[in-house]
Image: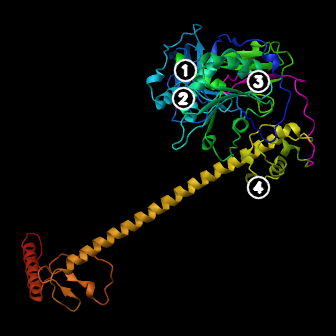
């Protein structure tokens, strides 16, 4: 098969052999597990248990929140003792809501059964994988059922299963392919069927001969059409777009998705965990983690999700001079803020750091514009230009130079003769730009709310004026229909005596209240006055006739 290459890349010391000598070991049970609810891209799962509930191993404790989300499950049997914020392994060091389970030591499973995939639709399979918590295990932790949903009108020609594992020190995928090659091949074929791929390719770097041999033997034994392809060892071949380029020659721009070019990519551990979910009814409650660095025994462990990192590191016999733990590899990993944080679905490697494990970073020097960073960049960016604009906080220029195309692989850092931590500058600038965008979105939302409120008030005012105008018009129309005799001051209705002053030349146009009292003629007025005088005279006479009162 013809292979292609991508621009840039570096060849750091792999440091892999020391952790591949021993087979994968099963981590023993611990007293307490801290299971974060949010472990994947998308919505945060909603807890469906409460403190005091007894749960079984594999029981769902967090329900997927929407389509782009994935459920979480109990890693062992025990009692839920807390649901609250705990620090998780993340560059931010911030806490997130977790379900804390006190293990009972029995490790009792839920009832498990195979999923009837032969009689299920593709949509039902995807929903099942969502509820089983299957996500990307290569680091991106994107919900797998979403990636299996091919957009309408698209077709996948090549499904690539990523077994490159290019980051130094990390060997969890290598040992998985060696020991569970059959399940990896079966899971790859399953995903190929679900996505309708014409070809299924497993790409493995040539520094893993044992894994390549195991996969080839498994495909031959199963009679599978899955192809195992050996690719050159160069960092970062394990990047999705880089591996697509190597295997297919297709270049996927940063603004596009791989499915736009009829390609989709999954990690080997992802397809293997999906196969176990289908075949055995096992949700994703554990993963393989490489422990290496300043430890007495470097190896890979099968670790329940939620196990505290401190308990896992203790199994590897850390050396006394250790001063921290790095999650991931030396190129893209980050230092964990506390060893009390739990293992999560994205934890593929833990490097126990100690003085002397890595060369001390020399003092940062001024950029000499040598262009080495641009030569090494696999995204064909200009890191030295991005560096200058980051230093100047010219964020609009950074976006023009495609800052967000940077995958933070660290190749530019690795080759920089001035020892400039370029990736740190880029991460800072990205966070600042994203913060500005969030503020702008909040300001835009506030402005839209204000404008809507003002428009509503204006509309209500206008509608009220229209109602009053209609009422006045209706009243005038009703008054105009009555025949009224003309007088000096206007027209008078002969029947009810209601004056119409709207025609008076000095009368204001503002509507007035209508006086409904009868209008008296001159004779009637005189008669009324005479009657009033007579009543007054009679009252006076009555008053005078009372005893004890003088006569007027």
Earlier in the chain: of badge 3 and badge 1, it is 3
Q: Residue 531 carries which label?
A: none
The residue nearer to you, when weighing 172 against 549, is: 172
Earlier in the chain: of badge 2 and badge 1, it is 2
Residue 115 image point, x, y percent: 48, 20
Name the residue that disc number 4 marks: 397
Name the residue that disc number 1 marks: 277
Name the residue that disc number 2 marks: 193
Magenta stretch: includes residue 294: no
Q: What element carries label 4?
A: helix
Which residue is located at x 58 percent, y 37 percent? 156
Name the residue that disc number 3 marks: 170
For marks 1 and 4, give the one nearer the viewer.
1
Magenta part mainly helix, strand or loop?
loop
Earlier in the chain: of badge 1 and badge 4, it is 1
- Residues shaded magenta: 339-368
Residue 536 image point, x, y percent: 11, 78
Residue 508 image point, x, y percent: 33, 83
For marks 4 and 2, give the one nearer the viewer.
2
From mark 4 to mark 3, how far is it between C-alphas? Answer: 36 Å
Q: Are marks 3 and 1 in contact (CB under 8 Å)?
A: no
């Amino acid at each position: 098969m013809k292979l292609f290459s991508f621009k840039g890349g570096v060849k750091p010391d792999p440091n892999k052999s020391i952790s591949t000598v021993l087979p994968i070991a099963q981590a023993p049970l611990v007293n307490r597990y801290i299971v974060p609810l949010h472990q994947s891209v998308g919505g945060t799962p909603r807890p469906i248990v409460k403190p005091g509930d007894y749960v079984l191993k594999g029981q769902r404790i967090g329900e997927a929140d929407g389509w782009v989300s994935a459920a979480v499950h109990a890693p062992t049997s025990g009692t839920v003792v807390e649901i609250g914020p705990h620090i998780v392994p993340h560059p931010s060091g911030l806490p997130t809501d977790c379900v804390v389970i006190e293990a009972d030591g029995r490790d009792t499973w839920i009832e498990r059964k195979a999923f009837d995939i032969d009689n299920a639709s593709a949509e039902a399979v995807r929903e099942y994988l969502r509820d089983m918590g299957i996500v990307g295990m290569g680091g991106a932790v994107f919900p797998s059922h979403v990636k299996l949903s091919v957009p309408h009108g698209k077709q996948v020609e090549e499904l690539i299963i990523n077994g490159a594992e290019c980051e130094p020190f990390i060997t969890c995928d290598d040992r998985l392919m060696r020991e569970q090659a059959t399940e990896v091949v079966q899971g790859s074929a399953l995903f190929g069927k679900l996505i309708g791929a014409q070809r299924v390719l497993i790409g493995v770097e040539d520094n893993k001969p044992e894994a390549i041999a195991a996969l080839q033997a498994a495909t031959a034994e199963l009679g599978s059409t899955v192809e195992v392809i050996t690719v050159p060892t160069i960092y970062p071949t394990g990047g999705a777009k880089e591996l697509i380029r190597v295997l297919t020659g297709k270049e996927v721009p940063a603004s596009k998705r791989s499915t736009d070019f009829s390609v989709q990519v999954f990690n080997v551990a992802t397809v293997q965990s999906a196969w176990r979910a289908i075949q055995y009814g096992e949700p994703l409650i554990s993963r393989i983690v490489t422990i290496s660095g300043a430890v007495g025994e470097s190896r890979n462990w099968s670790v329940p999700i939620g196990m505290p990192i401190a308990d896992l590191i203790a199994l590897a016999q850390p050396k006394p001079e250790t001063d921290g733990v790095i999650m991931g590899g030396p190129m893209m990993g980050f230092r964990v803020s506390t060893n009390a944080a739990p293992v999560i679905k994205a934890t593929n490697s833990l490097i126990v750091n100690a003085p002397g494990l890595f060369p001390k970073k020399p003092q940062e020097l001024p950029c000499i514009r040598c262009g080495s960073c641009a030569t090494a960049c696999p995204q064909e960016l200009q890191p030295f230009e991005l560096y200058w604009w980051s230093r100047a906080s010219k964020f609009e220029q950074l976006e023009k130079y495609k800052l967000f195309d940077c995958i933070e692989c660290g190749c530019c850092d690795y080759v920089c003769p001035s020892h400039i931590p370029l990736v740190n500058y880029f991460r800072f600038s990205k966070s600042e730009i994203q913060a500005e965008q969030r503020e702008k979105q909040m300001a835009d939302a506030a402005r839209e709310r204000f404008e809507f409120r003002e428009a509503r008030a204006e509309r209500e005012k206008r509608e009220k004026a229209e109602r009053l105008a209609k009422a006045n018009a209706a009243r005038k129309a009703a008054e105009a229909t009555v025949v009224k005799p003309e007088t000096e001051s206007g027209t008078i209705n002969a029947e009810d005596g209601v004056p119409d002053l709207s025609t008076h030349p000095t009368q204001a146009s503002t509507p007035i209240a209508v006086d409904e009292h009868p209008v008296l003629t001159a004779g009637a007025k005189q008669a009324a006055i005479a009657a009033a005088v007579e009543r007054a005279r009679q009252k006076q006479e009555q008053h005078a006739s009372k005893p004890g009162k003088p006569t007027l």
